[in-house]
Image (tube, rainbow, N blue to C red):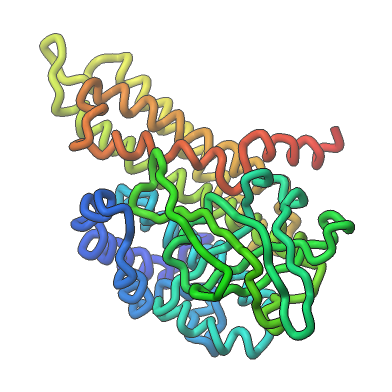
Amino acid sequence: MYRDIFKEEHQILRDSLRRFVTQEIVPHVDQWEEKGAIPKSLFKKMGDMGYLGIRHPKEYGGSEGDIFMTLVLAEELARCRSAGVTAAVTVHTDMASPHLVREGNAQQKEKYLPAIIRGEKICAIAVTEPDAGSDVAGIRLTAKRDGDRFILNGSKTFITNGYQADVLFVAAKTSPEKGHKGISMFIVEKGTPGFSARKLQKMGWLASDTGELTFEDCRIPAANLLGKEGEGFYYIMNNFQDERLVISAICVSHCQQAMEDAIAYAKERQAFGKPLSQHQVIRHKLAEMAIQIEAGRQLVYHTARMYNWGLDWRKEISICKAFCGELANRVAYECLQIHGGFGYMKEYPIERMYRDVRVWSIGGGATEVMKNDIANRLNI
């Protein structure tokens, strides 16, 4: 199935990832959820396996794979039953480090990228602020030039990997008066004077750290400017497309796993003298899920094909993100409902998924923002 996009090399990666997830992640997920963090050793293990640089340049340790390799990574990671783990890794691989690959100069790449690909340094992307989420142009963190330094002042919030990241790619306004044309990107290292991070407490994604970042006269070298000054908004918008595709693939994979769990439960659970799976209302719920999940999967694969063909995919990726983010929430609701009271208990994976997936219709561009983007591209 899907032989036009998944070749032998994709299947080899899928088999390898599925074994890794089963052996190295699933047995520890409950512990990491309880602790509220993923050990850095997981990134190192994934780096050793070549999972953290799938589309990055070979000269820095990457594999230079295609977009479909990234889909395999997202789909298989999402089966670990912890969206926190999945988010932490994919932020590192597909939402943060691509900024360095695309906008970084040779010196910056040489300094940071090999360690990021090996999993020795964890990275994060810092755009969102208390008063600016999907509205990137509304960020307030400033970066003022002072000789051979930039001085950063302001804050960021809801930053995945923000608390334990070694390297952060930070959006700041170098020319506030220019609006979105005054945004630039910077590299900030953990431990830089004036930079601090506080861990936030969340409803879900408990295994990943989400940080609130503060910059108080944080002085960084001018050489840490990433790309061209004033071009940061366009860098962020460009990378958002990749991010939204990865999120969509993760959502579909979450749904597939949840449906499989619900089917297994429905076959075992007896009600009114027969298994739940033999009651028409349950059968129809599961059939409707299968329809919606396949529709989401086809949207993801179609959009990835468009990217691979070099077509303009911006409308389609907004459609994909809006549909799949909402789909994950609908499927989680119905699967928990099928589990009944047991679905509300933490011993069943659907309880965690129900909490975890709620943010997918918000992060990476809220559904409302996606719909507005779609409307704009329809010339409405």
Residue in the picture at 37% in, 22% down: 285
Question: Which of the 4 image quadrants contains residue 214?
Answer: bottom right
Q: Is residue 331 above or below residue 204?
A: above
Q: How many discs mark residues in the rendered view?
A: 0
Most foreground residue, 111 or 279: 111
Residue at 74%, 36% (x, y): give it: 372
Q: Which residue shows up at 49% across the image and 80% down it?
A: 63
Quarter of the image with the C terminus in it: top right
Q: Quadrant of residue 66?
A: bottom right
Q: Position of residue 309 (x, y in %)?
A: 68, 63
| Residue 37 relative to residue 26: left or right | right
Left or right? Give the position of 102 relative to 67.
Answer: right
Quarter of the view holding residue 175: bottom right
Q: Position of residue 44 (x, y in %)?
A: 34, 76
Tell me what residue is drawn at x 52 percent, y 54 percent: 212
Tell me: residue 292, above or below residue 48: above
Q: Nearer the viewer, residue 134 or 255?
A: 134
Foreground pick, 170 / 114:
170
Residue 260 seen from this side: yes
> Residue 209 placed where, x, y %?
41, 55
Q: Taking 286 as reference, is 138 left or right?
A: right
Camera sees residue 1: no
When the figure is inspected, residue 345 is found, relative to residue 352, above or below; the finding is above
Q: Residue furthest right?
A: 178
Residue 298 locus on image (x, y percent): 54, 45
